Amino acid sequence: MKDGLLGQIATTFASVSLVAVGGANAVMPEIHRQVVDQLHWMDGATFANLFAVAQAAPGPNVLFVSLIGWHMAGFAGLAVATLAIMLPSGLVAFAAGRLVARLDGHPLMQAAKSGLVPIAVGLILASGLVMSRAADHDVLTIAITLGTAAFVFFRENSPLWALAGGALLGIGTYLLGLFS
């Protein structure tokens, strides 16, 4: 059974890896769709929690995929998920980098680069919307999400201030019995 699950983890994340234009966060909606909606490996709240832990921890953004693998199949799942999400896109990025270096300055290459930028931005925006749907269940969490977005967009302070503020607000409302 575990070998079958490890194979599913490998194929799921390897296929997503090949379309990871903009990084792991850009394909987070597709990962959510696969892991929560199609494969039913976990619910949306668990997915949001794993994503939040990975984003709060230092290290690469792809860490949330490793945590999904660990959640599903322990250390073996972590290793398989990490390799599956990184290896295919890493090989494609290496080959594309060599091609771009060779064709840099060509008008078609400039056009391709210009076309990929809005795609990456759109994928990242979709990631934020998917995560807000999974994590925001009441007025408080919606307010924290909107407040954090506004703080990061309009202020030049470190996003760590928003992270600390949201954590303190969550702890305070929990202690007051307003948030469970």
Image (cartoon, rainbow, N blue to C red):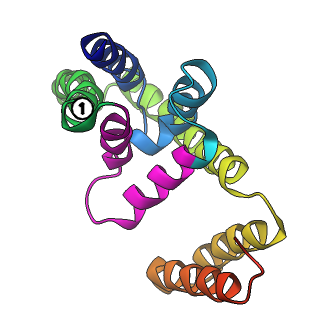
**Residue at image coords 59%, 84%:** 171
Residue 10, by quadrant, is top left
- Give left or right: position of 87 versus 148: left
- Give left or right: position of 22 versus 6: right
Q: Indicate whether residue 67 is drawn in magenta.
A: yes
The x and y percentages for residue 159 are: 48, 77
The x and y percentages for residue 164 are: 50, 84
- Give left or right: position of 111 versus 145: left
- Give left or right: position of 169 versus 61: right
Amino acid tagged 1? Met
Tag 1 secondary structure: helix
In this orientation, does residue 4 appear? yes
Q: Which residue is mark 1?
A: 86
Q: Which residues are magenta?
A: 46-72
**Residue at image coords 69%, 70%:** 180
Q: Nearer the viewer, residue 177 or 88?
A: 177
**Quarter of the figure with the N terminus:** top left
